[in-house]
Image (cartoon, rainbow, N blue to C red):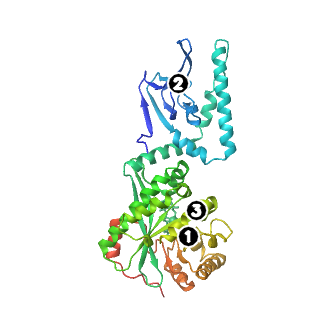
Amino acid sequence: MEDKKAKKSFKAGDTIMRQGEKGDCAYIIESGQVEILIEKPDGSTQQVGTRSEGTIIGEMAIVDEAPRTATVKAIKDCTMLEISRDDFAMRLKTTDPVIQMISQVILTRYRDTLTRAEILRESDNYPPPEALERSYTAQTDVVESIKIANEFRAALKNDEIDLHYQPIIDLNLGRVLGFEALMRWTHKEEGVISPGIFIPIAEKSGLIVEASKWAAKEACAALGRIESAVGNSTPMYVSVNFSSHDFAEVDFFDNLLSTVENSNIQPSQIKLEITERLLIQQPDNAKATLQACRDAGMGIAIDDFGTGYSSLSYLYYFPIETLKIDQSFIRAMYKEDRSLELVKSIVGLGKNMGLNIVAEGVEHIEEARLLQEMGCDSAQGYYFAKPMSEQDIIQLLGNWEPARISA
Ligand code: C2E
Ligand code: CA
Ligand code: CA
């Protein structure tokens, strides 16, 4: 990953990009002003326009491989928000193929127009495209997500990302079976940012792949440290969240296996948490990869079970060994009979198929009791413990009294 700051500054007079060179990024001008210069075949230079805040420069280079069509110089001090070619390529790759094609066609036509325009320059009258560009950058959610993606990239480099661990409890014995590793981002200015915000952006920009590799490595190392600190005789496990981008990597399994082998834990002590959506999106890739993980002894858990797709056939098709019942059903168990029946059915289905069941989001003892009565093996939730740092987990385990659930 390149070490790049999310924001770039240029002083008045600086050359920001040069005609004829291959570009690797575009910029949204946040403040300042630039001039766009075209060097003619005869060596003369002509200014063809200026741009100021809220407009974009260098956008063509990130869509195709052709060289820059103009030189851009700062005429006032500028700050820019960078959109890298890699970031853009990843976004383009995950969009509808028709959209990809149309963007390429539009760019080709635009370049063609420019080439012609150079010949006809003196007589031509261009409508200023600035207003149009501003309407694009006015979509603040797009700008915001680019900002967060850039900052997340830097955060991964600067150790601003951390893992917290939430215990998963055996409902019969009351002991800690393992932990789910949950990512935390402590931003220098904004404080703690929720994974609910940065994970979807990390997924869209493809940065999740590097984040997941880091998380798997850190989670394995942490479990090794926790076990040696508390000296438990029964091995515990760590559950790590993965997304569909991770499974698109051809060396996903090899990487994960070598991560586990280079740690102090066994493959049976790591569980992969994936969603139903992932299985639907990547069925070919996912099956072989998951089978390899399972064959190596790792666990596979379906996260947020019940919120995804209605077809249950994938439970046979993929080598799954754990179902995690989504917290929305657990929360509704007491309010709606239908939710209670749904949870009972999931527990029954899981048991019949020989799967482990984890109930998520258990906040009250009554929920834990109901689940235990239904035959649900294990649970996770604020009633038992919130996600916490490695140090706090070690302390918690040192003082752990088997949770008493039965009335
Ligand atoms: P998730 O995988 O379903 O994780 C469980 C979420 O429920 C966590 O939120 C956890 O703090 C929260 N939770 C646990 N017990 C309770 C409870 O009793 N009540 C309530 N209301 N909530 C509870 P968190 O940590 O904010 O994570 C949100 C989501 O972000 C996760 O949902 C997961 O989809 C994603 N995520 C977190 N870390 C990672 C990661 O390392 N990689 C990936 N790909 N996704 C991650
Ligand atoms: Ca999860
Ligand atoms: Ca979940």
Mark 1 vs mark 3, foreground winner is 3
Q: Is 303 located above or below residue 33 in the figure?
A: below
Q: Secondary structure at mark 3?
A: helix
Residue 309 falls in image quadrant: bottom right
Q: Secondary structure at mark 2?
A: loop
**Ligand 1 within 8 A of label 2's CB?**
no
Give the alpha-carbon distance from disc 2 to disc 1, as whole Å. Answer: 55 Å
Q: Is 67 located above or below residue 188 in the figure?
A: above
Question: Which amino acid, mark 2?
Answer: Gly
Q: Which mark is residue 14?
A: none
Q: On the rendered structure, is 106 left or right of 86?
A: right
Which sits earlier in the primary sequence, circle 2 or circle 3?
2
Residue designated by label 1: 327
Residue designated by label 2: 20
In this view of the protein, which residue sits in the foreground, 360 or 315?
315
Residue designated by label 3: 286
Give the alpha-carbon distance from disc 1 to disc 3, as whole Å. Answer: 25 Å
Question: Which amino acid, mark 1?
Answer: Gln
Seen at 55% across and 11% down, the residue is 42
Question: Which amino acid, mark 3?
Answer: Ala
Residue 116 falls in image quadrant: top right
